[in-house]
Amino acid sequence: MKKLGRFGISTILFIFISFVLAACSEDESIQESSDKSVRAEMEEDTEEDLQENLPEDEVLFTVIENNVKALRNGNQNEYKQTVHSESPVYNQRVDTMKQLSHYQLDMELSGLSVEERTEEEARVSFIQTTIKMEGPEFQNNKTSGIHVLKNENGNWKIYQTEVEEVITLDEDVLSEEVTMEGEYTDYITNLKNPFDDGGWTLGNYQEADGEAIAEYLLSHEDFSNLTELLTIHYYQDGNHQIGIENFISEMENNLTEVHTDSLEFNTLEQTSEEGVIEFALTDDEVLFDQEEVVRVFIKENDLFAIRYTTLDKKIDNKEDWIDMLKDVQ
C-alpha cells in the first residue's frame, strides 16, 4: 500500500486552512499561526517515528514460538538464533538445550501478550505447558512468566526470562494406553515383523505430513527406565524424496554435528534399495552411553528405517540383531 506524505491528510488540510485564514490578517498573526503549525508537524513526526521503531506483536511472538519449536525439534542452531548473544544466561540456555536433546517433549505456548515495549526492549508474558513424551525422568509442568527481548543487529531475541509460577502436572496424563491411529498406520502394521511376539509394547506413535514414527518398549519397561528401544520410521515416497544414500548421510551429519567427540558411526552395507548402519555414543556430555543398529530399506517407493537401541549397555549379539532387522519386510 502506498503511504501518504509524511504529514498525513489531517495535517495537510490544517496547514492549507491556516494559510488561507492568515492571509486576511496581520503579519504577526501569520507568523504565530505558522509557528503553531510547524510545532504540530514536528510533534506528529516524532510520534510517528517512535511508533515505526517499536516491534510489532507478531514479530515478538514469532521469536518466542521459534524458540519453543527449536526446543521441541532439538535443533540447536535454530535455538541459538532466538537467544541474544549477550544474554547473561546464554551459556546456561545452550547447556539446557543439549540436556533436553535426550527428551521428546510436547510443548505448547499460550497467553502471549506484550506487556511493555520500547525501541530497545520488550516484555512478553507467556504460559508454556511441557509434557514428556519420551526420555528419562522429567517433571511435566505449566510455567508462566515474562520473556524479555532485546534487539540485536536488527533482530529481536530473548535476552532473559523471568519465571513467575511453575505448576507441576500429574504424570498420569501420560499413563493412558498408546494406540496406533492415523493415515500411515497400515504401512507399519502390515510389515512382516519378527518382533510381534508379545515381548514389545507400543510406547509412542506420531504422524506428520508424509511420515510416521512408532516406538516399542520392552513389556516391563517405560520411558523412565528403558534399556532397549525399537523404533520404526516411515517416509511416504521416501525413495524419491530422500533415498538410501541421503538418509544415511543426513543421519551421520546430524549425529556428528551434536556429538562429534563421543560418536563412532559406521555404514556396514549400502545399496540403492537397502542400508545397514551402526553407531555408538560413549562419554557424551549430554546423552547416556548407547549403541544402535539401523536398517533402512525401500518398499514400494516408500522408505522405512528400523532401529534397535540399547542404553547404558552394549549390543551383545549385534549380528543377530542385524539379521532380525533384515527380516522386517
Image (tube, grey):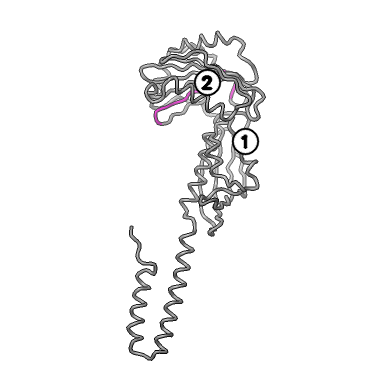
Where does label 2 land, which residue? 216
Q: Position of residue 146 (x, y in %)?
A: 58, 51
Where does label 1 land, which residue? 139
Q: Image point 52% across, 16% down: which residue?
A: 267
Residue 265 visible to an observer of this rendering: yes
The answer to which of 292 and 261 lies nearer the viewer is 261
Q: Position of residue 99 (x, y in %)?
A: 62, 33
The answer to which of 307 and 46 lies nearer the viewer is 46
Does residue 316 appear left or right of residue 55 in this picture? Answer: right
Q: Where is residue 135 in the image (x, y as percent from the top left)?
A: 59, 28
Magenta residues span: 209-222
Identify the mark nearer the N-term, 2 or 1. 1
Rounded to the nearest angstrom, the CA distance separating label 2 from label 1 is: 22 Å
Q: Image point 63% across, 26% down: which residue?
A: 261
Relative to 24, say whether 135 is above or below.
above
The residue type indicated by label 1 comes to Gln
The local secondary structure at tag 1 comes to: loop
Residue 309 visible to an observer of this rendering: no
